[in-house]
């Protein structure tokens, strides 16, 4: 039976010759909500009022550039033949790990210049980052990307998904597993857990960020294995290699701080 579903238009609206894409709106919305959350917590912890508004002005564009460079580098066989597509970011094709690398490096430099504790700023930012990631995955949904392997409509309906998600997963005559949704849900749960942890668990400085890093990496390592559009490096996907590295690094640093270094300020100090 031939299905006939029109995918959601990637263009939200048009202003003259300018096309405004849902992808950009969704990413920007996630960033804005994350910023507001970080500003509120930063104020409570007595960080300078402009800490996160200034930081995002530098980190956001650098993160996007790094995300694109990361993606293009691992897809160079295609982009070397289509150099005009390198800047076509509105068609998708950014790697979240590239964005995180760019954002973290920017934050390290920013904190040094402003004489702030990187780990204190990172702790405050952690829930905001994972919230932005949870929201941002819906940009992939609009673009019909970051999905898993082929499946059936019946299998999707058995998951009790809304009809608009099921229909959007019908791409070029085939239904696909909505791995974008898996990651969005995983990140949303992580966001809630981070908020609970910073309120009810006595964490040392930096441990909230490490908790975010390990939680995200565990989910990403598994979900990446279900995707069909992954960047590959040998037998594993690039994101899986990096996820495993981050899990080991995060747990290792946590253990070192708790059992070797010991004397560290607590969250909020």
Image (tube, helix red, strand yellow):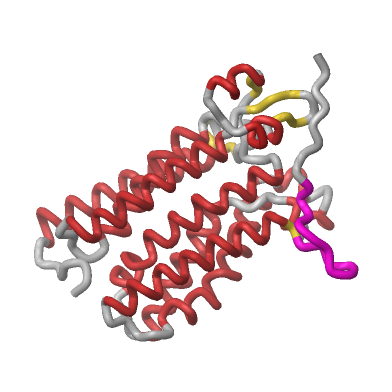
Residue 85 appears left or right of 146: right
Residue 3: percent from left, percent from top: 80, 23
Quarter of the image for the C terminus: give it: bottom left
Residue at 54% x, 29% y: name it.
Answer: 226
Quarter of the image for the N terminus: give it: top right
Residue 176 appears left or right of 51: right
Residue at 79% x, 24% y: name it.
Answer: 173
Q: Residue 172 appears in which quarter of the rendering?
A: top right
143 or 166: nearer the eye? Answer: 166
Magenta span dominant secondary structure: strand
Please determine whether, in this image, residue 69 is positioned above or below residue 214. Answer: below
Q: Residue furthest right?
A: 17
Residue 161: percent from left, percent from top: 57, 30
Please determine whether, in this image, residue 53 is positioned above or below residue 224. Answer: below
Residue 146: percent from left, percent from top: 62, 40
Residue at 44% x, 77% y: name it.
Answer: 52
Please determine whether, in this image, residue 248 is positioned above or below residue 64. Answer: above
Please determine whether, in this image, residue 29 is positioned above or below residue 139. Answer: below
**Can the viewer see residue 12 in this picture?**
yes
Residue 65 appears left or right of 194: right
Q: Residue furthest top?
A: 1
Residue at 60% x, 59% y: name it.
Answer: 27
Is residue 16 within the magenta segment? yes
**Can the viewer see residue 233 in this picture?**
no
Is residue 131 within the magenta segment? no
Q: Residue 164 appears in which quarter of the rendering?
A: top right
Residue 168: percent from left, percent from top: 70, 35
> How many labels, in total?
0
What stretch of residues is rendered in magenta? 9-20
């Amino acid at each position: 039976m031939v299905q006939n579903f029109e995918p959601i238009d990637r263009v939200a609206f048009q202003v003259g010759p300018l096309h405004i894409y849902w992808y950009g709106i969704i990413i920007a919305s996630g960033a804005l909500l994350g910023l507001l959350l970080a500003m509120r917590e930063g104020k409570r912890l007595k960080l300078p009022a402009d800490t996160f508004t200034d930081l995002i002005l530098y980190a956001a564009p650098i993160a996007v550039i790094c995300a694109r460079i990361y993606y293009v580098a691992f897809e160079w066989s295609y982009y070397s033949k289509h150099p005009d597509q390198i800047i076509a970011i509105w068609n998708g094709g950014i790697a979240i790990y590239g964005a995180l690398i760019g954002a973290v490096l920017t934050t390290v430099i920013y904190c040094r210049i402003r004489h702030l504790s990187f780990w204190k700023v990172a702790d405050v930012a952690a829930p905001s980052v994972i919230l932005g990631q949870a929201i941002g995955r819906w940009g992939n949904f609009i673009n019909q990307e970051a999905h898993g392997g082929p499946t059936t409509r019946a299998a999707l309906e058995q998951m009790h998904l809304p009809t608009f998600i099921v229909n959007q997963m019908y791409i070029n005559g085939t239904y696909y597993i909505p791995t974008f949704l898996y990651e969005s849900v995983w990140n949303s749960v992580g966001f809630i857990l981070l908020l609970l942890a910073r309120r009810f668990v006595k964490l040392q400085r930096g441990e909230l960020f490490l908790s975010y890093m390990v939680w995200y990496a565990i989910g990403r390592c598994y979900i990446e294995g279900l995707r069909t559009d992954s960047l590959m490096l040998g037998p594993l996907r690039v994101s899986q290699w990096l996820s495993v590295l981050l899990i080991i690094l995060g747990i290792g640093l946590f253990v070192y701080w708790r059992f070797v270094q010991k004397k560290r300020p607590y969250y909020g100090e």
